[in-house]
Image: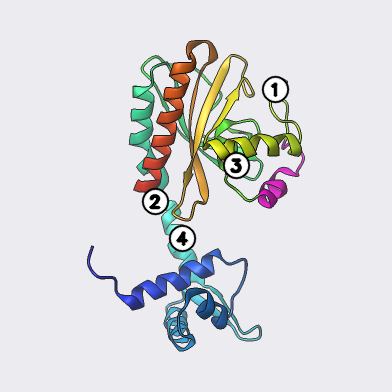
């Protein structure tokens, strides 16, 4: 990689800081947090404002992201980069599994896990994890893999709603405190599992996909018949989903 252009790097630092802020920010706070001279921050903000990337809230003396930044984000979403980058890795994950599996890419939306992609091994098995299906995040391995990496306050806010602890099989966490204890252990080990929480006779393992800042934005999971996966195979499946999640993150710029 060639030499980084300082002005370009600083511009991206400003945009990233504003995107991660909880609301509008002052130029002084940007200068302080990024270690950039205040005069340089104002120059960058002026250029970004002229292009529509940021907006100056004069009465508040603060800055926020503008319409152009939103348009860039929308274009990113329209291109479905996560699904495009994940699909070949997910297909290989399913094909290489030592037992029949369903491999899937899932994200957490509020208190639910939403499945975006699905690949099956050569020996097909039928599961409820179809593309577009929503399931309680507290019960799914993919959902908890993401939740385990989120701040506790955020998990509490997302799961403190009606329907968050739906009972499907009589197994799995039914309260926020029970979920919290489970997430603590899964955060420590780096992956999540479920045994019949969603469907009797089926188990799942999943690992989070993390950004470069260690923020979870999706998960890779494998679902299989519980009776077909002895301990040695389960250990292999765990390693495989963790490696796949890492590979997706690298491809996705994580």
**CB under 8 Å between discs 3 and 4:** no
**CB under 8 Å between discs 4 and 2:** no
| Residue 130 visible at all | no
Q: Give the CA separation, mark 3 to mark 4.
A: 26 Å
Q: Which residues are magenta?
A: 152-164
Q: Residue at x 46, y 76 (%)?
A: 52
Along the line of sight, the residue nearer the viewer: 94 or 1:
1
Q: Quadrant of residue 51?
A: bottom left
**CB under 8 Å between discs 1 and 3:** no
Q: Residue at x 52, y 65 (%)?
A: 19
Name the front one of labels 3 and 2. 3
Q: Which residue is mark 3?
A: 148
Image coordinates of residue 3 in percent, x first then y, are 25, 70
Q: Secondary structure at mark 3?
A: loop
Q: Give the CA separation, mark 1 to mark 3.
A: 19 Å
Image coordinates of residue 132 in percent, x first then y, are 53, 35
Name the front one of labels 4 and 1. 1
Q: Quadrant of residue 23?
A: bottom right
Locate the N terminus and report the quarter of the image it occupies: bottom left
Residue 162, above or below 10: above
Question: What secondary structure is the stretch in magenta mostly built from?
Answer: helix
Q: Earlier in the sequence, mark 4 or mark 1?
A: 4
Q: Which residue is mark 4?
A: 73
Q: Give the CA separation, mark 4 to mark 1.
A: 39 Å
Instruction: Specify the label residue 171 is tagged with.
Output: 1
Direction left: furthest residue: 2
Asked if residue 127 lies in the magenta stretch, the reply is no
């Amino acid at each position: 990689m060639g030499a980084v252009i300082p002005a370009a790097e600083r511009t991206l630092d400003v945009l990233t800081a504003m995107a991660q802020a909880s609301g509008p920010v002052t130029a002084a706070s940007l200068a302080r947090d990024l270690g950039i001279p205040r005069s340089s921050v104002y120059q960058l903000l002026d250029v970004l404002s002229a292009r529509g990337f940021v907006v100056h809230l004069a009465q508040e003396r603060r800055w926020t992201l503008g319409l152009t930044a939103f348009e860039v984000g929308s274009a990113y979403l329209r291109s479905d980069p996560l699904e495009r980058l994940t699909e070949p890795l997910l297909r290989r994950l399913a094909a290489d599994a030592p037992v029949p599996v369903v491999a899937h890419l899932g994200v957490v939306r509020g208190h639910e896990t939403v499945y975006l992609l699905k690949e099956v091994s050569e020996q097909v098995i039928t599961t409820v994890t179809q593309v577009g299906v929503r399931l309680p995040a507290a019960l799914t391995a993919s959902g908890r893999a993401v939740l385990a990496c989120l701040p506790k306050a955020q998990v509490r806010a997302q799961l403190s709603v009606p329907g968050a602890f739906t009972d499907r099989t009589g197994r799995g966490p039914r309260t926020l405190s029970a979920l919290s204890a489970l997430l603590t252990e899964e955060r420590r080990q780096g992956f999540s599992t479920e045994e019949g929480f969603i469907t009797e006779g089926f188990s799942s393992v999943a690992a989070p996909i993390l950004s470069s800042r260690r923020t979870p934005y999706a998960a890779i999971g494998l679902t299989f018949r519980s009776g077909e996966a002895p301990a040695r195979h389960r250990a292999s499946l765990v390693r495989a989903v963790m490696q796949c999640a890492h590979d997706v993150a690298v491809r996705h710029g994580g």
